[in-house]
Amino acid sequence: MLPDDILVHYGTPRHSGRYPWGSGKDPYQNAKGFFAERQRLRDQGLSDTDIARAWGMSTTEFRAIGMHLGEEKRAGDISRAVRMKQAGLPNTVIAEKMGINESSVRNLLSKDARDIKSNVNRTADILAEQADKHKYIEYGAGVELNMGCSDATLRTAVEVLKQRGYVTNEVYIKQAGSDKFTTLKVLSPPGTKRSDLMANRDKIRTPGIAADLDGAFTTGIKKPSSISSKRVKVRYDEDGGTDMDGVIQIRRGVKDLSLGNSTYAQVRIAVDGTHYLKGMAMYSDDLPKGVDVVFNTNKKKGTPKLGPKDNTVLKPMKKDPDNPFGATIRKQLYFKGKDGKQKLSAINIVNDEGTWDKWSQSLASQFLSKQSPVLAKQQLAKVRESKQKQYDDIMKLTNPSLRKKLLISLADDCDSASVHLKAKALPGQSSQVILPLPHMKKNEIYAPNYRNGEVVSLVRYPHGGTFEIPQLVVNNRNKKARRILGQATDAVGIHPSVAERLSGADFDGDSVVVIPHRGKTRIKATKPLKGLEGFDPKRAYPKYDGMKVMSDTQTQMGKISNLITDMTIKGASEQELARAVRHSMVVIDAEKHQLNYKQSERDNGIAALKKKYQSGGASTLISRASGEKRIPKRKTRSAREGGGIDPKTGKKVWVETGESYIDSGGKKVLRTEKVPRMALTDDAYSLSSGTRMENLYAEHANSLKALANKARKEAVSQPRIKKNPQAARRYSREVAELKAQINVARKAKPLERQAQVIANGVVDAKVRSNPDMSYKDRAKVTAMALKTARQRLGYDRNATRIRPTPLQYRAIQEGAVSQSMIDQILESADLDHLKSLAMPKQTQPLTRRQANRISIYRKNGSTVAEIADALGISPARVREYLSGTATVV
């Protein structure tokens, strides 16, 4: 006999014994209790958000459980209808007993309803299978697309598995090459302990991703191809090696030593399978017979070329096969052998031609603060004017969501600019790698990106002072220089003696900022300090047996650079500055050349200089701004607590997380983080000692902070957009294209998270095997590991960025997409691309005729500067075309 009804018992939601919403034998009794109580509260005027909060759950969990119980109820309805039908009851009676209409009964009795397993349960089964197989699986954004289900279905399936005893955790992993963290939502089989998960974070896998992980758990470097040491000649100090220290001269036309499309490159070359050459490679036409490589060194004759000890000209290869050179290898080259097959070249490229030109071209405060206040004021003002123009352009946008996104981005840029205090680059300024040309005159420079005969200043970072700025005349007619460097994209050739003035620069990849003297631009340069004449840090402070080699170059250079800056601003004497600069020259090469920097510190009286000019630490705004202070770990205020931005002031609102850990002594310790001092103050003048130059920077920083707050205040007041149905129909094709881009970007998210997991695993393993690994070496391993992991996963991060076409952008502007869709677009958009659409630069595109003339001139051997003069355009425009980034109409 079938029951006419079902007796339902439910108590306080989530507090009725072991069952959250009731008890009993019927399969959907819990569902009835949930829906009945939810409806009762809705009838009282409560929103779903209020109900979820009252029940102690998130709205996401509330919706997911509702969906799951809906599936459960439907399964129960099907079962009940089938039982009554099997008992011989007609559809009309079944409908009456179940309180539904007859068509609904027919749907419940249909074969499809009975045979098709719910998407939720099917997804739950797949997740369970993956979790049982891999033990730790992540189910964050984008996984649903790889599994072929909806986001809601995935979340509900996880709730189903949680009721079966499966365990969920949130794991934070550090993003490779960044101070940010990625949050992973991880599902594990019943009984899994969080401690086990944390110890095996590198084993977290993503369901739905079929990828070849073979080799992904390495840095991706193929075993280097070596050349014989018999092909290498060493040019020692006595033979002139010091003049070109760090340069690797290669015989032109040798296949296995070809630099590919480059004229010069920063490389590593394996020798005899045990050692390697490190430096800048460039072609040479006058090498001695019988050798293909000449390596220039400042070491004395008698120093063995290679051997079992460290004191050799060539460096011994690292024992780590994944990082044999201790450097970030960006490219390994190949050549065609005599048998016609591709073979691995001996050339391993760290940086090749065209890399240096892409480096930052702003003016650092450590340089500009030592120039005239007039120049500093002028270039800082240009930064503020640029930011203000961006703000004005953003406020003209009609789409509030895009306006909000770009305002927040601008605010972050202003905050960063107020800390780093970089100024606008001067006209024609560029970053160039320096190469030695001993035949050049000491006052000349071969610089094909600059006009013949013009004067240029060279600035190297870290920058000691105006006494380190050589000013040279461009000579691009020197035939030998032209033969060696040709139309160099981002290199300049100088006499070796010039490098000595550049804080003892080497020719193994060191770069300079080149500033041409044009118009009113005049860089202040003073005569070299007498205390630096003839000073060679490598000879003055060599390593001694048992000495501990420096491993924190960046930190030590920051300290001495700040000291020199503070001394300059406070008017230190030439003799005092010479002491500090000598020490900085030792520090910058101490790790690379194993120098005795501790003795240099004592000999140059650095402690006394600090006491005089830095009592209590950095003493001027320039050095204090980016100096870090430890504070309790914090985060921006949550939306529930009022949001991370104060709507009245636009300031960021922070709250302490209260996170702690147990130290080795069993004591509870509050977690802290480092924050720049400038970011902690509302008034930059509080960091100033009152000098004129500092006050210029203080005014600049405060203006940027004010603009950042103004932008955030406007951002939080932006209304949510309403979709325009007419625009949606008019741009239906563009909307569909944008949806496709969103799916591509979202599907890539799990791949990026998986790549981060793998890269972290590689780095952790390397650190465990080499606990003394320096921060610099760790960064190199991290970069290579992440690149390899992405490649093995078949994932190009840049290719998955959303880049709307002009027509798609117009569709967004006119309201053809919903608020939720535009949020998804902005989340994965290429922000620079969006800015180019929203705030296009006014630069006129090159004509086809101009482009053709550039190509012809370049083919005939003209330099960038010569082409620019011939066409009446800037060298920068020419470089843009040659690099493929210029617009041609």
Image (cartoon, rainbow, N blue to C red):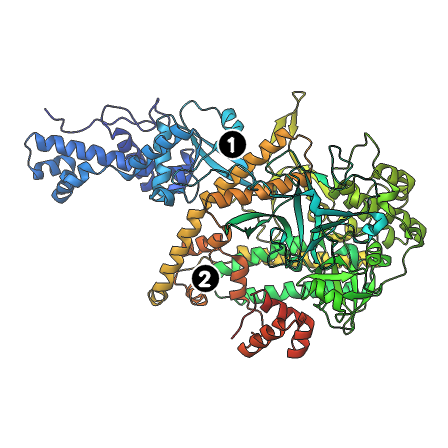
For the residues labelled 2 and 1, say whether their Cβ atoms are less than 8 Å apart.
Answer: no
Residue at mark 1: 201
Q: In this view, does 450 lie above or below 648?
A: below
Q: Which residue is rendered at x = 44% and y = 56% of the image?
A: 822
**Mark count:** 2
Location of residue 384 in the rendering, given as x and y in whole percent from the top left corner:
68, 63
Q: Which residue is rendered at x = 51% and y = 32% of the image?
A: 201
Label 1 CA crowd tier, 10 Å (few <14, some 14–19, many 20+) = some
Front residue of 524 and 728: 524
Q: In this view, does 854 lie above or below 537?
A: below
Location of residue 711 in the rendering, given as x and y in whole percent from the top left corner:
59, 58
**Image-quadrant location for residue 642:** top right
Location of residue 411 in the rendering, given as x and y in whole percent from the top left corner:
61, 56
Q: What element carries label 1?
A: helix
Q: If the image is split into quadrants, where does the N terminus sit?
A: top left
Residue at mark 2: 804
Q: Please give the label number shown on residue 829.
A: none
User: The residue under label 1 is which amino acid type?
Assistant: Arg
Q: What element carries label 2?
A: loop
Location of residue 12 in the rendering, given as x and y in whole percent from the top left corner:
35, 28
**Image-quadrant location for residue 150:** top left
User: The residue under label 2 is which amino acid type?
Assistant: Pro
Front residue of 750 and 585: 585
Q: Earlier in the sequence, mark 2 or mark 1?
A: 1
Does residue 71 appear in the picture of this structure? yes
**Mark 2 → mark 1, Cα distance in angstroms:** 36 Å
Q: Is residue 871 above or below residue 142?
A: below
